Image (cartoon, helix red, strand yellow):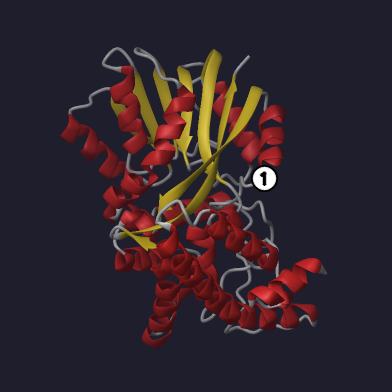
Amino acid sequence: MSDFRALDRAGFDPALAEYTGILGVDVAPALLALSARIESRKKDFEPENRATNRVRSERVALQKTVHGASLAAARVFRLARRGGRDKDHVMDADTTPHPNAQMHEYWNGLAGEKWVRLEHRLDESLQPFADGLFAAARLHSGERVLDIGCGCGATTLESARRVGPEGRALGVDISAIMLTRARERARELGLGNATFEVVDAQSDPLPAGEFDVVISRFGVMFFAHPEAAFANLLSALRPGGRLAFVCWQKIDANPWMFLPTLAAMQHVAIQRPTDPHAPGPFAFADADRVRGLMERAGWRDVTTSRFEIPFAAGGGGSLDEAVDFMMEMGPAAQALRESDAATRARVREAIYETMKPFERNGGVLMDAAAWIFSARRA
């Protein structure tokens, strides 16, 4: 009950604590924690006399976002409790029996095209995570590297550079669109030791024992059957080979995604997942669960470390560019593609007002939290 009283004092709607169905987290405590984090970090960016005003503006933006989101969440929750359905505000999750087929379609369509178009902004904003990944991977000259979910090839190309001409790097992905761009980049950079293939790393056979290291930058969370996928990856390593990958922590630990999503929920439906561990960006948020999956698949010495940074949200561009990015790539993107111009305008304004208090130095800086996993083959 103390949490609810604290929420009331902060100006948030206490009823949000009940609405976990859409985002898979208790929204109210998450927002309280976020508000406290903003308070504790107010000196990180500005002098004290300016920081107080900054924190106040951030809290006001949070309150406005939560107020609108709570109304939408309350409606969804009431309908769910009485078994009803509101087609304007509730979207049932896809029940396709083979989720990886859905992933193939998704990444070879609009999603793949958008990643190609935004590759430079995405690579720049994700560079700190790539740096953390390579620190964990500890690549050496002459090693053979397998990059899972390589997308447009940034981490494969960096791997090829690090292992030198005596080594090689193979990037695999299910998106032919992105791999076409990755091959172009390899030619542009003259990296003949970087190659790319369309491969579903969960189910397609991988060359047995051929690689020294397997890496992935946010590419392993989309497996329909992750334990089988981890077993497949293990088979591709030589004895003693290493694995390192980075994946997102839970959504409420990532305000860069959490807050714009709440803002969008005021105006459009966000797909309700039937399984919190279904393929998607936050499928590996539970580190203990992922560790168990890996160990059952045969991995040894599984370790996990937190990687938390101020993040250049929305692809690392200006505030307007960051908002446009969230409109295209965030959880509301699918619903927005089916929305009219007026609804899109309302969503854009809501996201803009939510992200604006975090604008700094020509960009938008918001907290981001990931896990970095490391393991080896016996």
Q: From the top left corner, tell me how far across and down residue 295 is, in percent.
A: 70, 28
Residue 220, above or below 70: above
Q: Quadrant of residue 54?
A: bottom left
Say which element carries label 1: loop
Is residue 246 toward the left or the right of residue 1 in the image?
Answer: left
- What residue is at 39 percent from the left and 87 percent from the top? 342
> Which of 121/233 is in front?
121
Q: From the top left corner, tell me how far across and down residue 82 is, in percent.
A: 80, 83
Residue 243 appears in the rendering: yes
Residue 261, above or below 286: below
Residue 198 appears in the rendering: no
Q: Quadrant of the C terminus?
A: top right
Q: Amino acid at mark 1?
A: Asp
Residue 140, above or below 53: above
- What residue is at 67 percent from the left and 45 percent from the top? 286
Is residue 303 toward the left or the right of residue 123 in the image?
Answer: right
Q: Quadrant of residue 132?
A: top left
Q: Quadrant of the N terminus?
A: bottom right
Q: Residue furthest front?
A: 49
- Label 1, on which residue? 286
> Which of 25/169 is in front?
25
Q: From the top left corner, tell me how far across and down residue 202 is, in percent.
A: 55, 37
Residue 170, above or below 80: above
> Which of 129/113 is in front?
129
Q: Residues within 10 Å of mark 1 (few under 14, many from 20)?
A: some
Q: From the top left corner, tell me how far across and down residue 148 is, in percent.
A: 46, 35
